[in-house]
Amino acid sequence: MHASGHAGPESAPNQHIFNLKYAPHFGMFRHSAGEDLLDQLQFMADRGFTAMEDNGMKGREVAMQEKIASKMANLGLEMGVFVAHTIYWTEPNLTSGDQEKLDQFLKEIRESVEVARRVNAKWMTVVPGFVDLRQDPGYQTSNVVNALRKASDILEPHGLVMVLEPLNFRDHPGLFLKTVPQSYEICRAVDSPSCKILDDLYHMQIQEGNLIPNIDRAWDEIAYFQTGDNPGRKEPTTGEINYLNVFKHIHEKGFTGIVGMEHGNSIAGKEGEEALIKAYVSVDQF
């Protein structure tokens, strides 16, 4: 792999041993590592990252999924989330109670089981979709809980976990799942180890703030975090979130899961990629 050069004498001694499993995604280091996905994985590992997430993993060719999984296993990289199903951004699906939409969702969850096994993934992202303006919120919640219970029945025998992601009103107006407390209520109702919360701190800073208290209240149902500073959705230290304190807090609480780096780079090119790595080192000093 061309990227093996990145493990040369000039960078190896500077490799930071991260306290948490921060997970970059494909494309985040393409100026440094090149376009080849396996070279990008090599670069991530060379720079001290121990996980990787890929929202689009399900859409990749099976042969590429297998190559990625093999390379990650060789590098000791843990697989983070991929998106498990079709997300309905503008029309109701799970909120509606519509049987056809439910059947489609469950079919896609079954397909995701195969993908997860192939790429050694444990977590997959689920977004319940758009609100149903013609139904009372209580009925919508009941429909969503019903769908998630059926999905949990599919996932539980495999030890897999769907993580529900609440999204903010500004970037994604009209979606059903908006907050951590709402996600907590739904997970408690589903009552399955296969249905947990993905707390994307960028989304939740916009939607509700109060990040650390909500982490504490919902702790038992949170299985995964994602990051991105606000405003801008770039790396930590570029906005208003005190990521050093947040990361220190979840580390001290014993979080051993993955923290997905679901954001852009604030500076273009190789220089920006180095700046991003430095930013994560700076907020990991605890």
Image: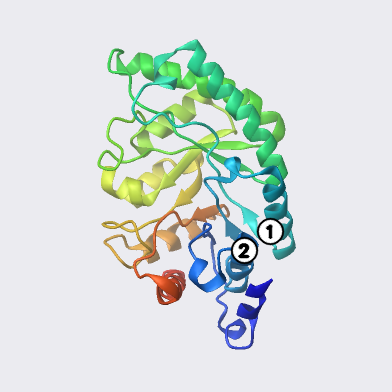
The residue indicated by pointer 1 is 72
Q: Residue 140, position in %: x, y? A: 37, 17
**Crowding near the residue tagged with mark 1, few <14, some 14–19, many ≥20 C-alpha atoms within 10 Å:** many
Residue 208 showing in the rendered view: no
Name the side, left or right, on which 142 lies relative to 82: left
In the figure, 27 relative to 113: above or below? Answer: below
Badge 2 element: helix
Residue located at (60% from left, 29% from top): 109
The N terminus, quarter of image:
bottom right
Residue located at (58% from left, 88% from top): 10
> Looking at the rendering, which quadrant does residue 123 occupy?
top right
Name the side, left or right, on which 258 lies relative to 235: right
Q: Are marks 2 and 1 in contact (CB under 8 Å)?
A: yes
Furthest residue to the bottom? 9
Q: Residue 286, position in %: x, y? A: 47, 71
Q: Residue 200, position in %: x, y? A: 41, 47
> Looking at the rendering, which quadrant does residue 138 occupy?
top left
In the figure, 167 relative to 281: above or below? Answer: above
Of the numbered discs 2 and 1, the one sitting upstream in the chain is 2
Question: In the drawing, what numbered circle is on residue 155?
Answer: none
Q: Amino acid at mark 1?
A: Met
Nearer to the camera, 40 or 275: 40
Residue located at (47% from left, 39% from top): 197
Q: Residue 19, position in %: x, y? A: 54, 66
The residue indicated by pointer 2 is 41
Q: Amino acid at mark 2?
A: Leu
Nearer to the camera, 282 or 63: 63
Residue located at (58% from left, 20% from top): 150
